[in-house]
Each structure stands twice: as C-alpha cells, then as structure tokens.
Image: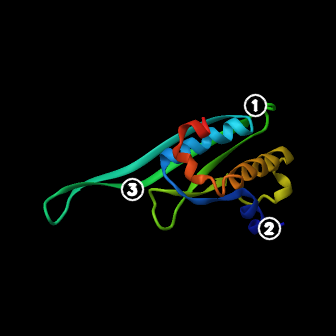
Amino acid sequence: MGIDEIIKRATIELPCAITLDEAEKLIAYIAKQLPANINYKSSYFKSIARGQDGKMSIQDGTVNLEVTISSYKNHATCDTFQFGHSQQDISKFDAIIFQQVPGWDLSEYRPEVRELWGDVRKIVNSLKNKMHLLLLDRYFV
C-alpha cells in the first residue's frame, strides 16, 4: 500500500469545521468514548489592528492543536494527531490527522495503532448529524 492509503487511513474528515473550543470538547468526548487518556497543546494567533475607518478589531488567525492519545486499557497503544485547518477559515479545524512516518508502509504501523485510528474514526463518524451538539458541554463531558 502506498502513501495515498496511509493518508486516507490516518486522516479523519470532520462533518463540519469546528473552533478550538469545539475541538477541545471533541477531544474530551473521544477520551470518554474510547476510553483513553489524552494530553494536548493548543496555540492560536490573533491580530489586533486598526482598520481604515480607525476602529480597532480583533481577528482570529491560525490555531494549532497537537494531541497525544493513549488507550486507557492498554497504555502501550498510543499515537499523536493534529487537527487540520479548514481551507475556508484557518481559525477552524476540519480534520484529524494522525502522525505519519515518511517512507513507512501501512503494515509498518503497529496493528493496535491502526485500530486506534479506526476507533477514533468511528467516534467522529457517529457525530455526523450531532456535531452541533459540540456546543453543549453536558453532551461531551
């Protein structure tokens, strides 16, 4: 299997673009559903600028979210992923992208890691018609 197959397996498209806050809620939901332990680091870029009309405004820029996930049942099963940026709005995310090792074939990834990718994909796909519920804290935590 080639790089295209690895990218296809390691990338999970989100049903819609989500904000940093919504992504954090999704991470908590994934942790609860697997179950898993998750550590993450987030960062964002904002601009405060004066427009031609003289008014100040704050604009959202690029956000980054790096996640390490390990199975609660088997701590040796772990991997990292990042949220991919939306093409329409770089302040939002539209995909989960697990780390990929250049030059590796799909068979070189441990079976339990590939299974973890699949488990996260199932959880995200189960939210297709419920993604708006990311806004409801009680649904995810």
Is 125 left or right of 59, judged from the image as shown? right
> What amino acid type should be assigned to the residue bearing mark 3?
Gly
CB-based contact (under 8 Å), mark 3 and mark 2: no
Residue bearing mark 1? 72
Between the C-alphas of marks 2 and 1, the distance is: 31 Å
> What amino acid type should be assigned to the residue bearing mark 2?
Gly
Q: Position of residue 75 (x, y in %)?
A: 77, 31
**Closer to the N terminus: mark 3 or mark 2?**
2
The residue at the point 84 percent across, 66 percent down is 1
Q: How many marks?
A: 3
Q: Secondary structure at mark 2?
A: loop
**Closer to the N terminus: mark 2 or mark 1?**
2
> What amino acid type should be assigned to the residue bearing mark 1?
Tyr
Mark 3 Cα-neighbour bin, 10 Å: few <14, some 14–19, many ≥20: few
The residue at the point 23 percent across, 56 percent down is 49
Residue bearing mark 3? 61
Quick one: which residue is furthest to the left in this view? 54
Quick one: 137 or 74, which is closer to the camera? 137
Tag on residue 2? 2
